[in-house]
Image: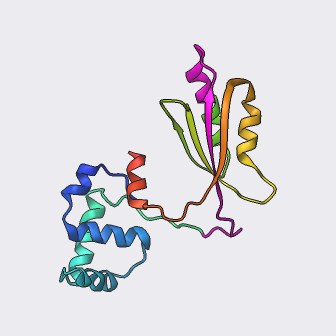
Amino acid sequence: MLGMSEDAWSNLDKVDQKIIEILNSNARTPSKEIASELKKSGHDVSDRTIRKRIERLEKSGIIKGYKAVLTDVSGINEYQVVLMKIKPSKSLEAVKDSIKDFITKLDNYLLVANMNGEWNMLVIMQLNSEKSNPAQKIVEKFSDELIDYRINEVDIKDVNILNMSLLLL
C-alpha cells in the first residue's frame, strides 16, 4: 500500500499516520471505526474528516492503492534464511545477478539482498510444503560459485509492514 520516504512519513501529522497504520492492517476499516480508534489515542476527529483525509492521502499519492492479502491456505508459516558467500571473481556481480534472477522466479521468495562483509547475499524464503526445501535448491544450483553458505529456519511473526514498505523505495 505504501512506498514512501521517511521524510514523507514524518511530514504527515499524527492523525494521518494513524489512519495509514489502521488502513495498512485492514484496508476495509470503516471511517467510523478509524474515528473511534483515533479517539482512544486522544484525537477527536469525525468520520467525515477521516474520509476527507483518506481522499487527500489518495490524491496526493501517499496511499497508492489497496490490495488483497490472501491467507496462507497451506497453514505453513515457516521460513528459511540463506546466507551465501560467493567465490571472489571478476564476474561476481554477474553471479549475484544470476542467483537473484533464479530466486525471483521462485514463487515463495520474500527477500533477496546483496550484503557487504563476510556474506555476499541474504535470501528469505517461505517453506511451502513439508517436502520442498527451496534453500537447498538454490545452494545446489550455484554450488560451483559458493565458498560457504548457511541455511537457517526462522520464525517471522511480527513484521512492521509500514517500515517494510520503506524497503520498496
- 98 vs 35, left or right, is right
Of all residues shown, which one is farthest toward the right? Answer: 131
Where's residue 18, x and y in %?
Answer: 28, 70
Q: Residue at x 64, y 29 (%)?
A: 98
Where's residue 16, x and y in %?
Answer: 24, 68
> What span is in magenta?
71-97
Of all residues shown, which one is farthest toward the top? Answer: 90
Residue 140 or 38: which is nearer the viewer?
140
- Vertical relation: 119 (above or below) 89: below
- 131 vs 119, left or right, is right
Give the quadrant of residue 88: top right
Q: Residue at x 72, y 47 (%)?
A: 134
Q: Residue at x 22, y 56 (%)?
A: 10
- Vertical relation: 142 (above or below) 164: above
Give the quadrant of residue 169: top left
Where's residue 13, x and y in %?
Answer: 18, 65
Give the quadrant of residue 127: bottom right
In the rendered image, the quadrant that contains the N terminus is: bottom left
- Vertical relation: 41 (above or below) 83: below
- 150 vs 60, left or right, is right
Query: Is 85 contained in the magenta span?
Result: yes
Residue 161 or 88: which is nearer the viewer?
88
Q: How is the image coloured?
A: rainbow
Count of numbered badges drawn on the protein: 0
Q: Residue at x 61, y 30 (%)?
A: 85
Query: Is 149 contained in the magenta span?
Result: no
Where's residue 153, x and y in %?
Answer: 65, 53
